[in-house]
Amino acid sequence: MPKSITLRLFFSECLVLIAFFALVVLTFDTVVIDGFAKDRLQGFIRYLELDLQEAVVKSDSANKLTMPYHFREGRFGDSSSDLYGFIYHDNKEVWHSPSVEKDLKVIKPHAELERDQTVFFKDNTHKSKPRYVLQKRVLLKNADNEDRDFIVIVSEGDLFASEQVNKLNESLQASMSVLGLALLLVRFLVLRSGLKPLRRIVQDLEAIDEGKKELLDGQYPTELQGIASNLNAFIAHERVRLERHRHHLADLAHSLKTPLAILRGCTENFADHKDTVNEQIARMDDIITYQLQRASAKAEHTVIKQLNVCTVIQKIHTSLSKVYLDKAIHFELVLPEHCFIYCEEGDLYEIVGNLMDNACKWCKRRVKVSIELNPRKDRRNYSLLLHIEDDGAGIPVGKFNQILKRGTRADENIHGHGIGVSVVHEIIQMLGGKLDGGRSKSLGGMDWRIYLP
């Protein structure tokens, strides 16, 4: 079996079409031939019925018929013909065509025929000479207007019908072959066209791998939008992890430079600087622990899936209510029933958890969390807009852009609005979102606005 989906579907359709055309030919042989023979015999029996009517009018008795010298169907009077005719009255044969003389088989009438009822069948008694038979019961009036009951039988060999149908069959097979090839060509082109979006996704993925593109940005069909979105989320997630590792390595290297320089200076006289060495070793251990804590991306490979943002917010709200129990914070959650996005669970918890935790630290009594669906910002559509507001003092004017930088805090005396916000900002940027902030109109404090794709 070929690996190509196009070829697989094409070969499958070839088998279906071959089976279909074979069935058509078989049906034609079994149904059309019989139908053709029956229609032919019905014409013969009408002619013989008219000849019988003429004979009945002229005859004194139904048992003694004088059929016309010239039949409407001349083959009834030809002794060499393979067209047979029989007429029965009261189950007795009153006439048969001359051709019956050379045949040993006499066809008997059907006993249960109703008036004007016909019976058609194929007689295979002589396998070398199969015949088609049509019987009909008729009621005719004689010269005295008296009813006469007859059964008229006509029979013909299948040679003529078979020859005619064979010619039609040859034409049918030729036309079916041409039609089949045309259908296969059309189906192949349709399959090629239908699977073109998959080839386009493969080409776009190759372009991403070569660095020519950043995301799958083509116009894909509705059925492939979910795959494209999932792949884009996966690509963005991998970039977030890679960028995060780079930042952590850079931070770790920069943080260890100073302790290493101090240790290098203490190597000449270790005994005099033992306390200093121990202090710097402890400091380096704290730095490494801190940087590992910040490296929230897990080492193992994870699959991006849809997360319900509302569920994450509810869980964080439950945890923070216990942590800040002494502040008796009033939480106001304005959330839809469901709100799904493609994101790694750890990233979403870090974004929402950091900003809600900061809101709890800076607020007086109130924290509000709300969600707007399908917002538009800077001529771009997003999946959601998350508001995290508090009634605290807010960020001082001119310091918003500063706290987004790594290692900067709005207030050095209060833990928050520093390292955590910068990490949140970096994660949102890597996910293709946007972090904005300002004064809350409803609570008067800080209003964090997180746009997520």
Image (cartoon, grey):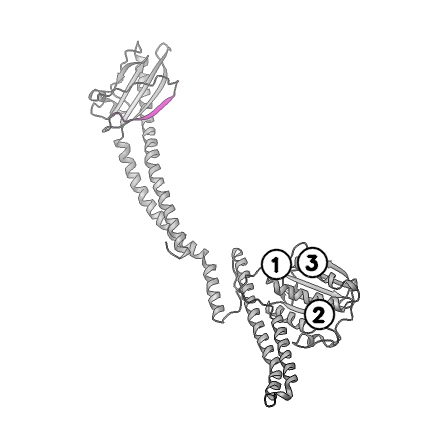
Rate crowding at label 2 as few (under 14), some (14 to 19) or many (20 or more) other CA atoms within 10 Å: some
Say which residue label 3 marks.
314
Q: Which quadrant of the figure contains the N terminus?
A: bottom left
- Between disc 3 and disc 2, the foreground one is 3
Which residues are the magenta region? 114-125
- Between disc 1 and disc 2, the foreground one is 1
Q: Helix, strand, or loop for circle 3?
A: helix
Residues under labels 3 and 1: Cα distance?
13 Å
Labels 3 and 2: the sequence-earlier one: 3
Say which residue label 2 marks.
437
Q: Helix, strand, or loop for circle 1?
A: strand
For residue 378, say whether it is visible. Answer: no
Disc 2 marks a residue whose amino acid type is Gly
**Which residue occupies the foreground of this view, 431 or 154?**
431
Rate crowding at label 3 as few (under 14), some (14 to 19) or many (20 or more) other CA atoms within 10 Å: few
- Give x and y (percent) for residue 288: 61, 75
Residues under labels 1 and 2: Cα distance?
24 Å
Q: Left of 427 or right of it: where is 146?
A: left
